[in-house]
Image (spheres, rainbow, N blue to C red):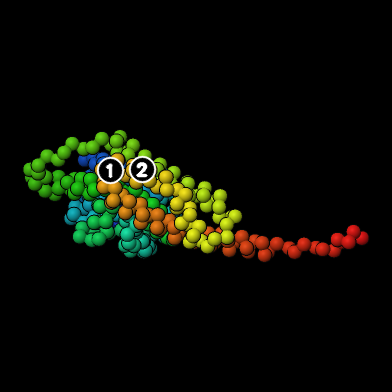
Amino acid sequence: MFARALLAFALTVGLLTPALAKGPLRRVTVGNWAGGSYTNDNTGNFSHCAASATYRHGTSLHVAVNADFSWTLAFSNSSWTMPIGNDVTINLWFDGAGPITVKGKVADRTLVVVPMPDNSALIRAFREGSQMQSVIGGVRINFALTTTSRLIPELATCVKWYKEPALARNEPATPPPKNDEVDQARTRLINEAAEEHQACMRKVMRDIVPYSTENADTLAQVIITRCQTEEKKFVSLGVALYGASKADVERIVTTRVDQQKKEMVADIVTFRAELNKALLSQPKPDNKGESGI
């Protein structure tokens, strides 16, 4: 699936030009991102450099820098069946801030392509963020952006090797790449910590919501408080694994928890409404015959 998604993106990058793409040639590998350089199959000329990352939820991210140094972001999922050529509005939150609203184009039924101007808020947030939350077609999807700060310059350098070879070769040597296994282990550990926190809150919700009469906001705060141990573990791992300050990690986690609190309040209100609806729809008991006759 990863290879097919990357090929589909290669065929449509550059604002959906019809040229075929061949590659990847010069490889680019950063963390869980993989790709490289591509050439136009019709002319043999360099076309762009691109990389893709797959996520457990089934949606992949793709990033490309074209021969003219324009940037493109894309999302793909093999289960999507969108009309080709349609415009799609996408809302993006980076580390809880936003949303940044962008327009995407359906390149094929499973792929949406979004232009990403070099000086835009989108590319700055994408390069600097650690978490990205998206809403595409009404569906909320989360992405960890643990290595994008390294990916962006790698892709730019990839293009320079074709468009500005002398300049690229005269640049100071870059530090040796980080161990990809370390990056993958780091991502796995932080994702597991996030899932433990989520699992704790789901369990507490099941344990107390059906039996409580407090208002939804109070219950959501109780759930968050009951899971502080998991939240603190998440913060500690962020500091240890990424070298960030505790204050920065706490700010990111607090923003994330505030969003989750809003979702919990909505879930609690919805649950109670559906429960009351179900109770009201039940037939009333038939009292005939209670005299024993």
What residue is disc 1 on? 242
Residue in view at x 11 percent, y 48 percent? 164
Taking 40 as reference, is 60 left or right? Answer: right
* Labels in figure, total: 2
Q: Position of residue 207 (x, y in %)?
A: 56, 49
Q: Position of residue 293 (x, y in %)?
A: 92, 60
Q: Is residue 272 left or right of residue 66?
A: right
What is the number of the mark on residue 280?
none
Q: Residue at x 25, y 60 (%)?
A: 121
Q: Residue furthest right?
A: 293
Residue 96 figure quarter: bottom left
Q: Pick whichever, 78 or 261, lies toward us.
A: 261
Label 1: few (<14), some (14–19) or many (≥20) C-alpha neighbours in 10 Å:
some
Is residue 13 visible to the viewer in this orientation of the structure?
A: no
Tag 1: amino acid = Tyr
Identify the amino acid type marked 2: Ile
Question: Would you say the residues marked 1 and 2 are in contact, meaning their CB atoms lie under 8 Å apart?
Answer: yes
Instruction: Work out how far the residue at label 1 is from the one at label 2, CA to CA, in angstroms.
Output: 10 Å
SS type, badge 2: helix
The front one of 265 and 91 is 265
Q: Quadrant of residue 107?
A: bottom left
Q: Residue at x 31, y 49 (%)?
A: 249
The picture places residue 1, in percent across and down from the top left corner, at 39, 43
For marks 1 and 2, the one nearer the N-term is 2
Residue 41 lies, in percent from the top left, at 25, 47
User: For mark 2, what is the residue?
Assistant: 190
Characterize the local packing of mark 2: few (<14), some (14-19) or many (20 or more) Cα atoms within 10 angstroms.
Answer: many
Q: Secondary structure at mark 1?
A: helix
Q: Is residue 100 visible?
A: yes
Looking at the picture, tell me which residue is in the foreground, 212 or 34: 212
